Image (cartoon, rainbow, N blue to C red):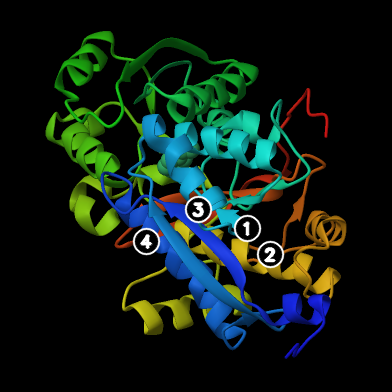
């Protein structure tokens, strides 16, 4: 017996969300925070988005670009998800964006900053709720130059995120009259920093800019302090250097200045409510990764609402997402034509166990992406 028409049936089946995130390795905690943020928003809506139940499918991407295409195809081909949400690592996300583009699967990137995803590779069906690697890095370069530093070195993992972050810092710092004398790199996810720290000590720049995140950021900040460099050469970074890591970094993180689209004491009603519910639900404090996951669910809901809950009505879903103003805990943001957040970048300083907001480094900063044709 036929119980519903095709359209009505489609409206009552759950929306299949494919979460492709790291559950192991140096970025495992970041993946968990994103997933928890996404699920928190859905739970706050009574377990539904725009009246539709949500069914989750999960793959641990291990932050391994070599496995990324196989992994994303498990969600696209085997599980036939309606929407992909992922991931943390830029190299893995680039493979996801390619697969999403080729299969026309809706993709929301809740962290990875690879510039090309909302640059040369941009696509109608690809959205991001986080940042481009350039955005916080550029702001940090501007601030470091304003602080009077003339000669800086950068140190990063040698993959898209590290290299693009260093490039963003160079853009901001050199625009302000500084000079980056050397970019030091090591392979992801290595944490043998000693030889590079010795090089920094020998060259004595006025400042160092570092891109590391997760477990690698904990080790780097501790090693920098253990080498005594924090006493003589100020360390700067995008906020990933200290977000979600301060407890493990301890005294070594105190006073570090970073730039990011989130801070731990924004003290707005929206952020306070989010942080309270997150802490109650998961018994830990929210961080930027949790916010980006939470906002991925909000963005999906905007698209679904615009399409009356019908995820298959792709044009309406995309139009609803592209034009939405996301009421994020970080502050409201809109999306650029290439589907990347246009957002305030905060200046923060570690004090106790929080990244304390010291002001807005750059207001409504958009990525300067060129070459995006949808
Ligand atoms: C990235 O690979 O894009 C990334 C990873 C961790 C934090 C920020 C960016």
Of the numbered discs 3 and 4, the one sitting upstream in the chain is 4
Foreground: disc 1 or disc 4: 1
Dot 4: within a 10 Å radius of its alpha carbon, few (fewer than 14), some, or many (20 or more) residues? some
Residue underneath mark 2: 300
For the point 44% across and 77% down, the residue is 278
The residue singled out by tag 4 in the image is: 32
Q: What crowding class fits label 1: few (fewer than 14 Cα within 10 Å), some (14-19), or many (20 or more)? A: many
* Label 1, label 4: how far apart the Cα atoms are: 18 Å
Within 10 Å of disc 2 (Cα), the crowding (few <14, some 14-19, many 20+) is many
Label 4, label 2: how far apart the Cα atoms are: 19 Å
From where the camera sits, is residue 138 visible?
yes
CA gap, disc 2 and disc 1: 9 Å
Place residue 99 in its image quadrant.
Answer: top right
243 left or right of 5? left
Badge 3 vs badge 2, beta-carbon distance below 8 Å: no
Give the position of the N terminus as an image quadrant.
Answer: bottom right
- Out of 340 and 210, give the one closest to the viewer: 340
Nearer-N-terminus badge (1/3): 3
Which SS class for mark 3?
Answer: helix
Image quadrant holding the C terminus, namely top right
> Which sits earlier in the primary sequence, circle 4 or circle 2?
4
Marked residue nearer the N-terminal end (2 or 1): 1
- Provide residue 258's location: percent of width, then percent of height: 45, 43
Between the C-alphas of marks 3 and 2, the distance is: 22 Å
* Residue 322 position within the rendered picture, expressed as x and y whole percent measured from the top left: 81, 54
Q: Quadrant of ligand 1?
A: top left
The CA distance from mark 1 to mark 3 is: 13 Å
Badge 3 or badge 2: first in the primary sequence: 3
Residue 83, disc: 1
Dot 1 or dot 4, earlier in sequence: 4
Question: In the image, residue 42 lies at what x, y percent?
Answer: 57, 77
């Amino acid at each position: 017996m036929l119980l519903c028409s095709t359209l009505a049936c489609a409206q009552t089946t759950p929306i299949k969300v494919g979460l492709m995130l790291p559950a192991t390795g140096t970025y495992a905690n970041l993946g968990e925070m994103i997933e928890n943020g996404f699920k928190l928003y859905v739970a706050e809506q009574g377990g539904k988005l725009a009246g539709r139940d949500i069914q989750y499918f999960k793959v641990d991407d291990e932050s391994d670009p070599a496995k990324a295409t196989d992994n994303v195809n498990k969600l696209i081909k085997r599980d036939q998800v309606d929407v992909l949400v992922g991931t943390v690592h830029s190299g893995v996300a680039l493979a996801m964006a390619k697969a999403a583009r080729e299969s026309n699967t809706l993709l929301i990137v809740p962290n990875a900053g690879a510039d090309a995803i909302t640059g040369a590779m941009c696509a109608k069906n690809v959205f991001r709720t986080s940042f481009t690697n350039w955005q916080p890095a550029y702001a940090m370069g501007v601030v470091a130059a304003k602080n009077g530093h003339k000669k800086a070195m950068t140190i990063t993992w040698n993959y898209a995120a590290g290299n693009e972050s260093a490039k963003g810092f160079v853009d901001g710092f050199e625009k302000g009259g500084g000079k980056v004398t050397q970019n030091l790199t090591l392979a992801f996810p290595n944490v043998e920093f000693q030889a590079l720290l010795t090089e920094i000590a020998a060259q004595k720049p006025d400042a160092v800019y570092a891109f590391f995140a997760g477990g690698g950021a904990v080790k780097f900040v501790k090693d920098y302090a253990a080498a005594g460099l924090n006493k003589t050469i100020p360390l700067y970074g995008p906020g990933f250097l200290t977000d979600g890591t301060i407890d493990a970094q301890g005294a070594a993180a105190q006073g570090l200045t970073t730039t990011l689209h989130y801070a731990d004491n924004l003290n707005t009603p929206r952020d306070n409510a989010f942080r309270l519910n997150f802490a109650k639900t998961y018994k830990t404090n929210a961080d930027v990764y949790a916010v980006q996951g939470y906002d991925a669910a909000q963005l999906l809901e905007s698209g679904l609402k615009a399409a009356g809950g019908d995820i298959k009505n792709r044009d309406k879903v995309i139009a609803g997402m592209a034009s939405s103003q996301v009421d994020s805990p970080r502050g409201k943001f809109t999306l650029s034509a290439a589907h990347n957040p246009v957002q305030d970048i905060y200046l923060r300083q570690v004090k106790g166990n929080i990244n304390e907001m010291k002001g807005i480094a750059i207001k409504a900063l958009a990525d300067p992406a060129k070459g995006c044709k949808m």
